[in-house]
Image (spheres, rainbow, N blue to C red):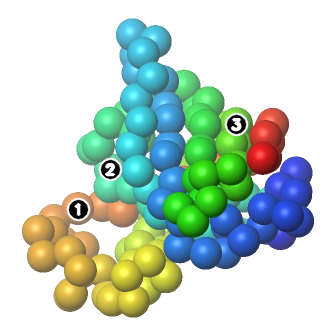
Amino acid sequence: MVALIPETHQDLLDRPIYVVATTVMPDGQPQSTVVWWDYEGDFIRFNTADGRQKPKNIRQNPKITLLALDPNNPFHWLEIRGVVEEMTTEGGVEHIEALSRKYTGRAYYSDFNTRSSPDTETRLVVKVRPIKVTAL
């Protein structure tokens, strides 16, 4: 379990709940996208492809907010404000494959995603250290 996450909201980390990740654009505007997530130790993790807006924003400003909303109960949600402490290609393909199995039950590159392959994109594991957590 990730530090600061109440036990009452651990299910949002364990279940395949879609999460909104909000980063800060170079001009200061927020930029939000839906991501798949999991956790490892005290870090929240999500995966993205290098070259997209999220990693560009994170390299300029590592502050991030993640919002998970239970689709079965809109009054059960979790906001995590944090800082990206690491963005690495190490294990990126394996991580997206594990997330795809969690969320879709299918392989990412050979089944779910038919637009790209590990040869055409570089996957990044993004590790977020929670700083402030709000849970309802």
| Residue found at x 60% / y 52% | 74
Q: What residue is shown with label 3? A: 81
Up-down: is 22 above or below 11? above
From this viewpoint, is residue 14 visible?
yes
Q: Outermost residue toward the left?
A: 115
Q: Is residue 19 left or right of residue 4?
A: left
Mark 1–mark 3 distance (CA, rounded to whole Å): 28 Å
| Residue found at x 70% / y 55% | 76
Q: Which mark, residue 50? A: 2
Question: Of callouts 1 and 2, which one flags the residue occurring earlier in the amino acid sequence?
Answer: 2
Looking at the picture, tell me which residue is in the foreground, 123 or 67. 67
From this viewpoint, is residue 88 visible?
no
Mark 1–mark 2 distance (CA, rounded to whole Å): 7 Å
Numbered disc in front, either 1 or 3: 3
Q: Which mark, residue 131? A: none
Quarter of the figure that contains the N terminus: bottom right
Q: Secondary structure beneath disc 3?
A: strand
Residue 3 falls in which quadrant of the image? Answer: bottom right
Q: Secondary structure beneath disc 2?
A: loop
Q: What residue is shown with label 1? A: 121
Looking at the picture, tell me which residue is in the foreground, 9 or 46. 9
Q: Residue 32, percent across and down? A: 42, 36
Looking at the picture, tell me which residue is in the foreground, 81 or 84. 81
Q: Residue 113, percent across and down? A: 20, 75
Q: Secondary structure beneath disc 1?
A: loop
Q: Are marks 1 and 2 in contact (CB under 8 Å)?
A: yes
